[in-house]
Amino acid sequence: MQLPDAEQLIATLAESMRPKVSADTCLVGIHTGGVWLAQRLHALLGLSQPLGTIDVSFYRDDYSAKGLHPQPQGSKIPFDVEGAHIVIVDDVLYTGRTTRAALNELFDYGRPARVDLAVLIDRGGRELPIGASFCALTLPEALPAGQNLQLERDDSGALTMRLIHA
Amino acid sequence: MRNPQLNKHGELQHLLTIDGLPKGIITQILDIAAPFTEVAEREVKKLPLLRGKSVFNLFFENSTRTRTTFEIAAKRLSADVINLNVATSSTKKGETLLDTVDNLCAMQADMFVVRHESSGAPHLIAQHLENTGRDHIHVVNAGDGRHAHPTQGLLDMYTIRHYKKEFHNLTVAIVGDVLHSRVARSQIAALTTLGVPEVRVIGPKTLLPTDVEKMGVRYFASMEEGLKGVDVVMMLRLQNERMNGALLPSPQEFFKVWGLTAEKLALAKPDAIVMHPGPMNRGVEIDSAVADGNQAVILPQVTFGIAVRMAVMSMLGSH
């Protein structure tokens, strides 16, 4: 499969979000790829609220099967969730379970006015009724379950998509 | 011999003592505890990790702080917490420890937090659970006799790491009644495992275990010598209730020689921190001016204790 250019997808995603966000819109990146992406979008869209980050380790539904991540990063929500417009940002949308965990966690901080989801790539394979509000690329055919698509960052800060065969 | 605290995958199965616990597991507990400290700042101070699990606080010996912080930790993880004040219940009527445990297992217990005046009681329960094939039930030692108080030792390590960042360049002094202190034993095991190059114990010879230097520590017979240049001062409580016979002249006399005062603390490094596991005997092992002073981190220890107990329970509950 020809991997899409991440930098190009980021520009596309930012442009699709621009008419739908205001200066007060809050971004929350999901660790780790979603945080990198959220940092880019935050700069491109010129948002004024500080960036939030979520580590869904403590909200995962497979905790009893897979155990805890040995070094959870923790979540930092540096703005008031109550009444806010929030965009959850992740690199790849797959089963929807990570998004569900992030939503659950977010609501423990307060009641947002509206929550959107922005992703670079929708790879198909949803197991929950969850969809992205903003998506730069939807794969025409769902990626097989054994494969893993993720964002990577090099030392210069450049982002690329990588396909990992498990 | 297999470490009874680890399961066959090398994961934490019970927390019984810091002695013999691999460095990697100790570090993992501290790493997992770090993000838990933020939960208290949320509107909903709960995480769903132990949702639907039942945690039994089994306290055969009185304790307020430890039992309360375990209860808060379990509740922040969404567990159901059942507090049994066993000191005043069935055992008084003659029920054995393991019969009590079996009965609570029949009530679908998932975890026991055990405090007992006899050393080894939590081990006995863990062994019994293993022998009867109940691998899904976990035991946390909340203090047994003079033996161990691992979560106290761990929260002390968390506190030191919080203020000092690293362990490999520290000099740490433990002061007071080491002989009767399960806390001291857990602290020494944790400090040496984490690579603290110099652990000192300071106190009257009558309150030191005879083999104290075999634990890898240096003994000092005076506060003036022992506190010189240390980064961390860990005070111990004078355990009046565990002392029978005349090991000491009087609390006043003890304070004069071994009590931590501002003058003595001035011998330590200027940025040294002062710790105490509580409850404090003011004017016996520590002067109020020090206990309330700006080098004391005694109340942060209590707060960090919740996060560390959450980390332990969530690791146990994850398998």
Image (cartoon, rainbow, N blue to C red):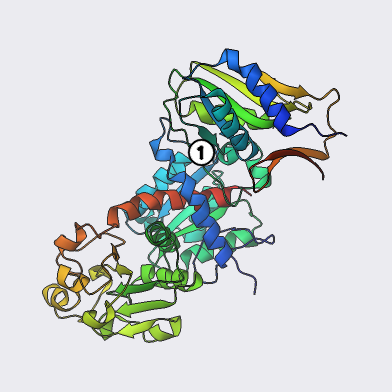
Residue A5: x and y in percent read: 76, 32
Q: How crowded is mark 1: few (under 14 residues within 10 Å), some or many (20 or more)?
A: many
Looking at the image, the residue that sits furthest to the front is A156
Is residue A27 at all visible to an observer of this figure?
yes
Residue appearing at x 83%, y 40% in the figure: A146
The residue furthest top is: A19
Q: Left or right: where does residue B176 sit relative to residue B3?
A: left
Residue projecting furthest to the right: A1
Taking depth in this image into account, of B319 and A155 the one nearest to the observer is A155
Q: How far across and how far down the image is residue B216, in percent?
A: 44, 81
Q: Residue at x 32, y 82 (%)?
A: B208
Residue A132 visible at all: no
Q: Is residue A43 above or below residue B124?
A: above
Measuring 22% from the left and 57% from the top, which residue is drawn there? B294
Question: SS for tag 1?
Answer: loop
- Which of the 4 image quadrants contains residue B130? bottom right
Q: Position of residue A158 (x, y in %)?
A: 67, 40
> Residue A64 in the image: x percent, y percent?
64, 43
**Residue indicated by mark 1:** A75
